Image (cartoon, helix red, strand yellow):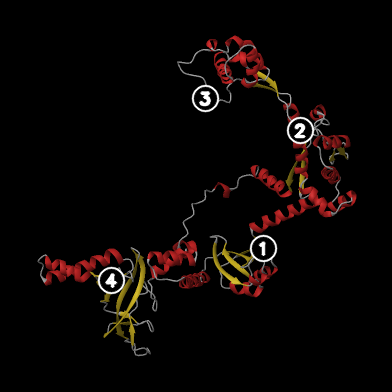
Amino acid sequence: MSTKKNWKELFYKNYSENGYSQEEIEELYIYDMELQAYFDFSEIMPRCLKLQNKIRDEGECREIRYYWKSHSQEAECPFCGMVSRQPCNDYFTKPIQDIPRDNLTVYHEVTFKKYFCENPDCKYKRFVERFPQFSEEDARKTIRLKKYCIERALGCGCNHAEKELKAEGAVVSHDMIMEYLKAEGARQVEENLKKDDVRVLAIDDINLRKGDKSSGCTVFIDAETHKTLIIIRGTTKEAVKKVMEKFQSVEFLSRDRASSYSSAGEECGKTQVADRFHLIKNAHEAIKETLMAEMPAQIFIRDGDGWVQETQGEGAVQNVRFHVPEQIVEDKIKLAGLSEHKAKIYRNTLKMLELSDKGLRSADIAHELGLSLDDVRKLRRSAASTLENVRNRIAERLEYINSNGEISEKVPGSRAFKTVAGPGVKPARESIVEPYRQTVIEMWKAGGNHRTIHPVITAQGYTGSANAIYQYLLKLAKEESENVISRTVKKHSPKSWEEEFDSELAQSLPDLSLEKVSRDTVYRNILREASKTRPESDSDETVKAKPNPKTYENSRS
């Protein structure tokens, strides 16, 4: 069975079977072709191109072809520009791909007319008519298909756009899409260079590869519209000057501190201003340099009564220093049970913090403590966690000691999944264990269970089983739970450190805690607080317009 469906053949066949004459069918077919061409392709097809037929192939090719024929009366010579009205009896046919539909590749088989050039001075005697709004001269794709490819590439890149377009039915490659992008970019740059309404020109340098100065480029932007005009390779004065000379309407040049841009602006006679970005950037750098000189990279915030504060200096400038008494340090080491190595790290950490408050650098602290510079840096990085570890160890030991004397309450059947219930259950007073009630309750409260109680009351004359005692206890727990609560003191297995641990000292020792904050965090908080008191400007009150979606047409405007 053929996979090709010819619209003209099917049209003629169906109308013929319904009793239409050949002349009527031909007239209806002309109307049908005109209507299809109008509704589907009126936006891209010139009126002189008439739709003749369409063939749909759902086999391996999976395509649909529209057949067009030119009925033009005149055409302009592409070589000399003269309009010709002398067609020759020759035609040129070529397939032009369009946007796919229904996952089928769409082709337009267009039959172009050829004309004689009426200009005697033109070196070409004949030419093929052209329709630039439909497709370019030697192109095999329509203008709108190229735009469609460019839009998809701008959204997801050429490789991914190729996969998506092929899935829709288009016959394209990523190299072809890249060529379309480059051609459109070159055309846009050419248009930008012809602009005569650029008043403020902003320039800056970028690297195509991060950190590689050999890939340096210069970006030219219209500072009023914020549109990129052109990007050139190189950051030299000669390259910048050559581009600036193209924009004769420019009055102001916005730049950074690059000397090459400054020299180019002076030679072109432009009024030079510093752009806001670089002004703010320079201000940030100046503040950061000041902070680096006056503030360490890591700032330690102390909390707790264990830190002894000392104030030195007089007047408005006073230096606050902290240290921990030696006795508190040794008590914490003993209570935490630190090993000799960890105790040394704990002492060195506190000593390092004390020396840092005195203004000593890491190298000086290393010399003072007899450590290497790397060891001091490790102490800085882990200072907060070192103090927190000692604090947690003491708290865990104190909690263990306090929980050792807690009273535990237990009710019979607290761990039993099945309990005594139901309407047929006899009360506890009717149990065979009832005569021994006092002995059972006393032994249960003393920590016994039905197994340990059984031999005792058996010696007193009890003849039942141990399970009957268990059931009796369950009934008592249900009927009078308050009378059968067993209270025992919790006892843990003794620890090796338990005898040396002084819980009263642990509770009375002052707390030592430390929080580490980076210099950058402090700077960000300063900026955040400063922004709250910043007066509103006119630009802040202006409501920003919602940005348009990124499309091919928006990128051109």
Looking at the picture, how far across and down is residue 182, in whole percent? Answer: 50, 72
**Which residue does the image show at 43% across and 64% down from the upper left?**
164
Residue highlighted by disc 1: 256
Q: Secondary structure at mark 4?
A: loop
Distance, label 1 to label 2, CA atoms, is 62 Å
Is 356 placed above or below 19 here?
A: above
Distance between the alpha carbons at the discs numbered 3 and 1: 83 Å
511 lies above or below 218: above
Between residue 253 and residue 444, name the one nearer to us.
444
Q: Is residue 405 placed above or below 110 in the rendered structure?
A: above
Neighbourhood count class around disc 2 (C-alpha, 10 Å): few under 14, some 14–19, many 20 upward: some
Q: Earlier in the sequence, mark 4 or mark 2?
A: 4
Label 3 sits on residue: 418
Viewed as shown, does residue 338 lie left or right of 84?
right
> Which residue in the protein does label 2 denote?
397
Mark 3 against mark 4, which lies toward the viewer? Answer: 3
Q: Which residue is mark 4?
A: 47
Residue 295: tell me if it is visible. no
Residue 228: assigned label: none
